[in-house]
Amino acid sequence: MGTYGQSIYGLSQYGTDIHPDFDVSPFTATPVDYSTVSLDWKAPAGSWDSLRLIRNRYGWAVNENDGEVLLDQSHQATSFVDTSVVGGHWLYYTIFISASGQWSRAGTVSCLMPKNNGYTDLLYSLIPEHYKVDVKQGNNLTDDSNTLNPYLKPFLSIFGFGFDIVQSYYDSNRYTNDAMRTRFDNIAQLATQFGIQYEASAPAYLFRQRVRDAATLGRQKGTLEQIRSVISETTGYDADLRAGVNLMLSDDQADFDHPTFPQWDSGVNYASGEKVEFGAYLYQAGSNGAYGQSQAPTGTNTSNAYWTVVSYGTDSTLVDANGHVAGWEEISFTAGVTPGTNGVLVGIGVQNPTNPDDKAGNALWVRNTNSGGSVATIGVRSVGRVSGQSSMDPQQPVLSGIPVPYTWKAWDPDIDYQPGDMVLYHGRVYQALTASVNVSPPATPTANTQWTPLGYDDRVQMCLSGYAQAYSGEQVNVYPFVEYYDSHGSLITALYSDSVPAYQVLDSFSQGWNDWTTRTTDLGSATWTETLGQWTSGGYSGGSAYPVGTTASIATIAGHADGTVSATFLTNPGNTLKQGVVFRLQDASNYWRAGRTGLYLVQSGSVANTYTYSTSFSDGDRITAAFSGSNITIYRNGTQVLTITNSALSTATRVGMAVT
């Protein structure tokens, strides 16, 4: 049975109390130089399975994984030398003992690791030169060839080391009000100043964060960002919070079965538009209202002169096109062909779960690509946006979009990771098991003592369905069209095609990579080829790729003659070279390049054709080139800016990026 409260030998303990035999005191930590700490403790008595020594830079460990594991063994040990320690800050050491699978904290100790402030050299410089000579019988003190006393400086280092300890202690007191650097003993007092209750069971790193951010979180109180930060700094895990449309604004709306409506009553004179439940159905009064038994609802899924069926009342938040319980239902209509765009804008009303009167419009572009006649039966079909279509309202993807998995930040060798932290490494998400700095996750999807992969399937799982019926009655294909938006509703990129995509790759360039002869894309496992020049990647937040040097460079992967290629260019090369995505590349002298100012056909090393945009691309704009047969279309951030017809190099298949 778990016990909670003060432990016998530690500050606090969740779980069973520490058995007195496991006490390792006296537990001492002594700095012996500027990078080494000597640790000594008494051997624990009794029967136990494992001893673990943990170092933490922020406070004493609260469990067996809270920090860097320095020692983990099943046999007796009473000392350890911690080397390569950085001076100038406090270190906290904790020993845990495991017995029958139960870890118990057996002892804690802390020490200030002194920083070399140069006091030994200072003392040595203050001694007159003639006192530094190694005096031996027959030595001439005025002889410049005499050697210096080799024991003087080591002797002075005894005092210099002591002065460095004192200086380091005074320096540490400068950070008394810095929650991340002050002595752990001061954290409880700092927390009290902000009204935060000190919890000895909380990991020191997380509790320090809460104290550090207390003022900021106080100003943000009630916002999504504040709630997300409090959850993260309390649990150590990131939280994905979204403000939905289903706000619980009243007791009725907060009811689990909301929305609920009053039962029909023959004695009530209902005004036009009022809703009632009768049987298992929801009805709305007609334009003339309704009153009495003679003007009652039907009690079935049919309307009459007084009442209109709204939905099946048992689940009014889950209905399809004809008002029945959710299922498959074809939505279609007959329309003439619009010669300019072959497109029709269809608005589908989605019932608001908290207010059935409010239907949020979900605008879909529908294209009629049939060639069999002037009219056609149009179904929902997701295809690329065509010329003349307006941009989507930024709030539409925020409110109605499908959330995709959170993209974690790439692993950084300079970050002090704590247990539970998530990172992206080689296209896969890993979780930290212990605290570490400059210890990378494994390159292969396997676990080690520091990191474990979160799943072994790195694909994003989504379900997309659709159906279209041609005018002639024959069945036609439905092709996927996915647009990605950020949290503000701004378009990031899109995947679309007029044919089934046979090959998809993605490279974020978030990992540093100098030898591109072995580099593969994050998704799709396509191998990069340096068609011209040399390339490297990484070095900038969010991922980047750029040429080595200032000469023309092209990097490509295997693709298809028909397809789509996109890239975002953050900066200009700064010389006469031009950037762009390349496609239908035959070799370094024959290819298409979609650049910032126009589309270029390069043949035999020279520009053969130029197609100029009306407006040049800016830093941060995404260039997308879609090519099929002799048709080539260029998009800026998802908006079409150019379309041409040219069949040159239509059999070449390589795609990529170029600075030429």
Image: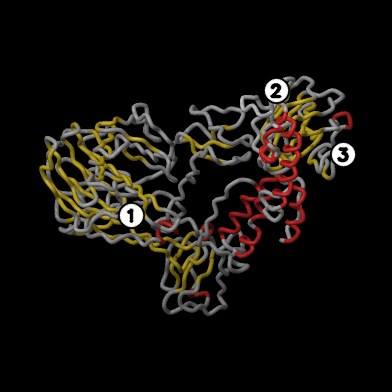
- Depth check, mark 2 against mark 3: the one in front is 2
Three-letter residue code for mark 3: Ile
Residue bearing mark 1: 331
Q: Secondary structure at mark 2?
A: loop
Q: Pointers 2 and 3 in contact (CB under 8 A)?
A: no
Q: Earlier in the sequence, mark 2 or mark 3?
A: 3
- Depth check, mark 1 against mark 2: the one in front is 2
Q: Secondary structure at mark 1?
A: loop
Dot 3: within a 10 Å radius of its alpha carbon, few (fewer than 14), some, or many (20 or more) residues? Answer: some
Disc assigned to residue 8 = 3
Classify residue 359 as left or right of residue 570: right
Q: At 84% across and 23% down in the image, what residue appears?
A: 47
Q: Earlier in the sequence, mark 3 or mark 1?
A: 3
Three-letter residue code for mark 1: Ile
Instruction: Examine the image and state in which quarter residue 615 appears.
Output: bottom left
Instruction: Examine the image and state in which quarter residue 279 appears.
Output: bottom right
Q: At 26% across and 59% down in the image, what residue appears?
A: 389
Three-letter residue code for mark 2: Asn
Q: At 48% across and 66% down in the image, what residue appears?
A: 356
Residue bearing mark 2: 139
Dot 2: within a 10 Å radius of its alpha carbon, few (fewer than 14), some, or many (20 or more) residues? Answer: few
Q: Measured from the top left, where is residue 507 in percent x and y?
A: 37, 38
Q: Quadrant of the N terminus?
A: top right
Report whether residue 382 is seen.
no
- Location of residue 493 with respect to 392 vertically, above or below: above
Gap in Å between the C-alphas at discs 1 and 2? 109 Å
Gap in Å between the C-alphas at discs 2 and 3? 65 Å
Q: At 66% across and 29% down in the image, what residue appears?
A: 142
Name the residue furthest right: 20
Gap in Å between the C-alphas at discs 3 and 1? 71 Å
Classify residue 309 as left or right of residue 223: left
Q: Quadrant of the C terminus?
A: top left
